[in-house]
Image (cartoon, helix red, strand yellow):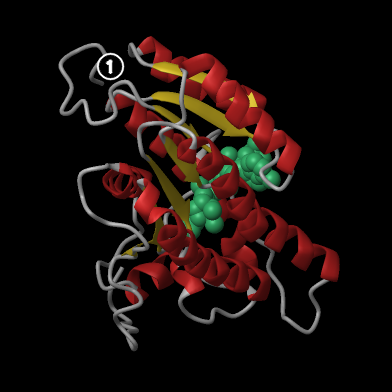
Amino acid sequence: MQALDEPRMSDTFAGDAAIVTGASKGIGSGIATKLAEQGASVVVNYRSSEKRAESVVDEIVDRGGEAVAVQADVSDEDDVAAMVEATVDYFGSLDVMVNNAGMTTLGPAEEIDIEDWRRVVDVDLTGVFIGSRAAGRQMLSQDDSGAIVNVASMMGEMGFHMRAPYCAAKAGVINLTRTLAVEWAEDGVSVNALAPGFIQTDITDQTQDSAGYTDIDIHRRTPMARYGTVEEMANCVSFLARDDNYVTGEVLRADGGWVSDAWRYRENRA
Ligand code: NAP
């Protein structure tokens, strides 16, 4: 593995401070590591997995980067405000905010407990609003512009059985992203969303059995015939977080072609 103090492929985020929510594992840990590789000082946010967050920080620091773990529940406005304040105390600014933390619940719509609905919407949608607003307030007060990237899902663009709260929340994230983008564009804050397809992480491993599909089903249904990787999602976020691309209010779908393909089921493809 390349050390972070070796010559980097790019210093795109040199001197920038970034928060990645839900960075203790999965897609978030990959994003945090990628932004650090590209020069950012990174806040690795977690809710409960402190040890995992600390190991993401250790990996970044061992490779010559700068990172710190900060606990905050993204659905709690006070927690998130304190995290933004801590970021500015540690690193002097907040230049990139990645609202990645998310969760899901599975069940037929007619049976979902209303508290489960509320928790998913609280974390996946309200949490993105809270994070974007706290970051936006800080970025609007700075001389330099900033970038916000919200991790939505391809399931925010289509119906998907057993996931009513998740699909509703992710659709909300997509249109919230467009709305914040047009409100803050003139002040130099870009707001974009990433809409991943199936990426192999804890969330997919945990839901797969109860959702009733296998890896082979995913391969058959996906035009690219495989899961996406955490590294690929991190590359997409890195692009959206740049300040040299004239992109705002955009939803980058990274789903191996899933949504573009209305009908696909091939029996003999593993
Ligand atoms: P994951 O492996 O389950 O990781 C989820 C992360 O979110 C963990 O770091 C977790 O921290 C954190 N988190 C959950 N609730 C939180 C809260 N209230 N406050 C702060 N952090 C919280 O999930 P993932 O697959 O990497 O998913 C990351 C994002 O991508 C989510 O928004 C998800 O909806 C989206 N996405 C994933 C896929 C996929 O196929 N994997 C597809 C489309 C979209 P703790 O462990 O400390 O709780």
Residue for point 48% across, 65% down: 179
Quarter holding the C terminus is bottom left
Q: Residue at x 15, y 28 (%)?
A: 9
Task: Answer left or right for 99 relative to 104.
Answer: left
Foreground residue among 53 and 171: 171
Q: Quadrant of residue 131?
A: top right
**Does 99 sit left or right of 86 as displayed?**
left
Q: Nearer the viewer, residue 268 or 174?
A: 174
Q: Give percent across and percent down for residue 95.
A: 41, 33
Label 1 CA crowd tier, 10 Å (few <14, some 14–19, many 20+): some
Image height check: is 181 above or below 68? below
Q: Secondary structure at mark 1?
A: loop
Residue 263 rendering spot, x and y as whole percentages:
33, 88
Q: Mark 1 = which residue? A: 4
Q: Nearer the viewer, residue 173 or 222?
A: 173
Residue farthest along the bottom direction in this orientation: 263
Q: Measuring from the top left, give residue 20's x and y in whole percent.
A: 49, 37
Q: Is residue 80 left or right of residue 157?
A: right
* Residue 47 in view, yes or no: no
Q: Is residue 28 above or below residue 225?
A: above
Q: Residue at x 78, y 64 (%)?
A: 118
Which one is nearer the viewer's eye here, 270 or 46? 46
Residue drawn at (34%, 56%), measured in percent from left and top? 228
CB at disc 1 and ligand 1 closer than 8 Å: no
| Residue 250 higher or lower than 171, as above or below | above
Is residue 66 visible in the rendered image? The answer is yes
**Which amino acid is tagged 1?**
Leu
